[in-house]
Amino acid sequence: MIGRALKWVVIALFLAVVLCPLAWLLVSSLKLNSDFFTNPIGAPSPWTIGNYITVLTEQPMLLYLVNSVLVATLSTLVGAAIALPASFVFLLDFPLKRFFSSLLVFGLFVPTSAFMIPYYLLVSRLGLYNSDIGIALVYVGIATPTGFLIVSTYMRDAVRTELVEAARLDGATLWQTFLRVAAPIAMRGVVTACIFLVIISWNELLYALLLSQDDGSRTVQVAISFLVATYSANFPNAFAAMVLALIPVTVVFVFLNRRIVAGLGMAVGLK
């Protein structure tokens, strides 16, 4: 009985820590700017949706959202297209297999900020500065280790070595074995990896800020940072933009939460 009560207390505390900032964000987005500074914790007086109207009419917020969708989609597709064949290759035996596998996983522990200058120079010299493609390609480099870890863990558990060997004995080429045997079986792992890659790309700010300077390629995260980075910052407007930016990710989580939880399990090697 005490154990069950303790469990619910811990759950309630965890939910409070997670949900209270979200509730404060929603409530603050419905305040006037003057009301926010005089009463940052209490209820709005008056309640208003004017911040949402302002963000959608005075800022090209829809363009920013479209840019974020394009960048997240492109980086996710390219990242998955790299992670899937790479995971299959690591089912096979080849020299320095352990070294290269460790090198890919090591990418999870390297601070992304360490590559700011190399990424900036590469994107600029390729003529992709201020473009969604340039930002998306950088996100591919950032998120590929995560995608590889998820897909390779799933493929290692689902695609047995005996199955690959049987396909080779039946006369299938390595490419045919990958396309007809390994890839279809590992597709659930790919879907899970894609969910995480979308979330990583959608929430990233540092490189989106570094590699874009105009509205044509600016993502929603950069737009939000600009709303609160000036002396005349209107925080309720920024909060309204944050709520709008949360909607796509929230929809993804609501419909795919089981796959996300399964991906977390795979990321730490759990069943």
Image (cartoon, rainbow, N blue to C red):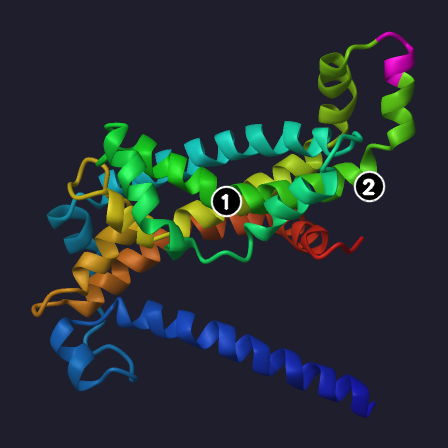
Q: Which residues are magenta?
A: 167-171
The earlier-in-sequence mark between 1 and 2 is 1
Q: Residue furthest left?
A: 232
Q: Nearer the viewer, residue 236 or 93?
A: 93
Q: Secondary structure at mark 2?
A: helix
Tell me: residue 184, above or below residue 223. above
Q: Amino acid at mark 1?
A: Ala
Image side of residue 199 versus residue 91, left or right:
left
Residue 267 pos. (x, y %): 67, 53
Q: Is residue 149 magenta?
A: no
Specify the farthest residue to the bottom: 2
Relative depth, front residue between 9 and 212: 212
The secondary structure that dominates the magenta segment is helix
Residue 50 can be seen in this image? no
* Mark 2 Cα shell of 10 Å, populated few (<14), some (14-19), many (≥20): some
Q: How many marks?
A: 2
SS at circle 1? helix
**Which residue is identified by label 2?**
157
Q: Which residue is mark 1?
A: 143
Q: Please name the residue shown 23% across and 59% down the image.
A: 225
Say which amino acid is labelled 2: Asp
